[in-house]
Amino acid sequence: MIPEKLLEVLKHDGVVAIATQGTDGPHLVNTWNSYVRFTDDGRMLIPAGYMNQTEANIAADNKVVITCGSSKVAGNLGPGTGFLIKGTAEFISTGPDFESMKTKYPWARAALSVTITSATQTL
């Protein structure tokens, strides 16, 4: 289940950091909160323009760690909150999920689909 507070965070400006594990160690790539969408079955969809190293890493190890946040959403200790999301991922370049991303973001060459295993509020 996707926490309501996470959905609220993603409605505001902010950066999403996506971490994967590669042969050279951890790799990070960023996108924007506003680019993240959710499917009816609760997967995160993120348009991918480049993310070539991320895609190569996921082909070898599909685990991802994602952080996102917003200073505009009240947290546990005051203004601002964030989330640590763990899950498994795949890149998709065909089918309805990809087509919905491509329609909204014409520059997308693929969509990063993330099945969330945990979403923990960090602030």
Image (tube, rainbow, N blue to C red):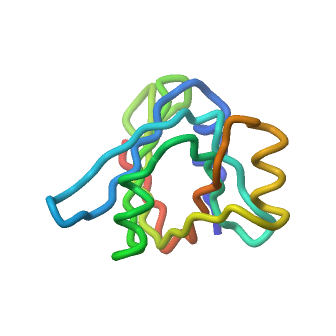
- Near-viewer residue (59 or 45): 59
- Near-viewer residue (48 or 68): 48
Up/down of 107 relative to 53, above or below: above
- Near-viewer residue (61 or 78): 61
**In the drawing, does residue 25 fall left or right of residue 110?**
left
What residue is drawn where x is 50% and y is 42%? 50
Quarter of image, res 45: bottom right
Q: Position of residue 60 (x, y in %)?
A: 35, 76
**In the drawing, does residue 21 fall left or right of residue 81?**
left
Quarter of image, res 73: top right
Residue sticking out furthest to the left: 24
Q: Position of residue 85 (x, y in %)?
A: 44, 59
Q: Position of residue 46 (x, y in %)?
A: 61, 49
What residue is drawn where x is 82% and y is 54%? 99
Quarter of the image with the N terminus in it: bottom right
**In the drawing, does residue 25 fall left or right of residue 85?**
left
How many numbered dots are placed on residues in this image?
Answer: 0
Up/down of 52 relative to 92, above or below: above
Q: Position of residue 77 (x, y in %)?
A: 37, 35
What residue is drawn where x is 80% and y is 38%? 104
What residue is drawn where x is 54% and y is 23%? 72
Quarter of the image with the C terminus in it: top left
